Amino acid sequence: MAGVNWTDSTIEAAGTKVHVSRAGRGRPLLVLHHETGTLDRLPFYDALAAQYDVLVPHHPGYSRSPRPDWMRSVRDIAVVYRGLLSELKVAKPALVGLGFGGWIAAEMAGMAPADLSHLVLVGAMGIKPPQGDILDLAITGYMDYARAGFHDQKVFDKVYGAEPPIDQLEMWDICREMSFRIAWKPYMYSQTLPHLLGSVRVPALVVWGDDDKVVPQSASERYLAALPNAKLEVVKACGHCVDMEQPEALAKLVTTFIGRE
């Protein structure tokens, strides 16, 4: 998007180096990316940066952030990000979590429920679906796994290329290995998280693609039950990666929900 100027920096939080991209002005908004990592720039990020002060950290061990050998849980990342916000002196941000990033956002919300303004969870992992199972990276090739995130394979081709470059394939493999380190047993959910969300009384928006093949939509029911002030929006003709497949629709949902100061 024209007029959006991103800056990239490496910030140390909780003794861990985190790559952070930042753009925009206004209310702070932290966007937490998928378990497949993130591209440096996405139209969804640009759309949010047109209205907010957007921070996109790369999770430790994913994309451009180095891997901390000690890290063993998703809650560890949530603690690191709480430290990151403290280092940057960012108070009461809105949290937008995408897939695996939704799990991290939910953990952060449960840790400090008064220190956020809004919570948006998009196809969020972190809770065991009552029906169906979260797609298993261990038995799905990383190319097939990435493609499973899209309802329309032509959109995948547009985002990543019909034949993604070698460095992208390597990055997916690195991200997969990190996911196994921190989210293996139980796979991609926490047994305790649903019990820790009751104090999160800020407005919460739960978003799901109607053709999510990665996280069954039934998981949304448990998030709605766990969060006292949550509502659901379903995006039609869309898979798990709503941010990449329907960026304009998701940006509109988010900006309408969060509003402006």
Image (cartoon, rainbow, N blue to C red):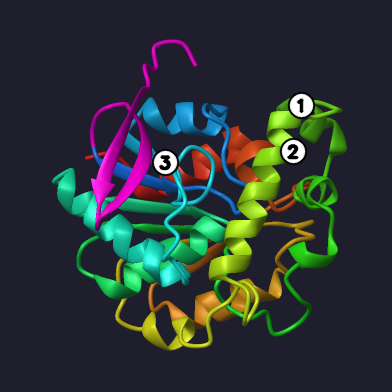
Give SS at disc 3: helix
Rendered position, 156 above or below 195: above
- Name the residue at the left extreme: 89
- Point out the tag, 3 or 2, that comes first from the N-terminus: 2
Residue 229 image offset from top left, x and y in percent: 38, 72
Badge number at residue 169: 2
**Contact, mark 3 vs mark 2 (Cβ under 8 Å):** no
**Badge 1 local density, few (<14 within 10 Å), some, or many (20+)?**
few
Nearer-the-camera pick, 134 or 177: 177
Give SS at disc 2: helix
**Contact, mark 1 vs mark 2 (Cβ under 8 Å):** yes
The part of the image, by quadrant, that contains residue 150 is top right
Cα separation between marks 3 and 2: 33 Å
Rendered position, 255 above or below 86: above
Q: What residue is at 85 percent from the left and 49 percent from the top?
A: 144
Cα separation between marks 1 and 2: 7 Å
Q: Which residues lie in the magenta part?
A: 1-26
- Apparent side of residue 188 relative to residue 83 in the rendered image (left or right): right
* Residue labelled with disc 3: 255
- Point out the tag, 3 or 1, that comes first from the N-terminus: 1
* Residue labelled with disc 1: 165
Nearer-the-camera pick, 117 or 90: 90
- Apparent side of residue 162 relative to residue 174 in the rendered image (left or right): right
- Amino acid type, label 3: Thr
Q: Exactly how many numbered labels are in the figure?
A: 3
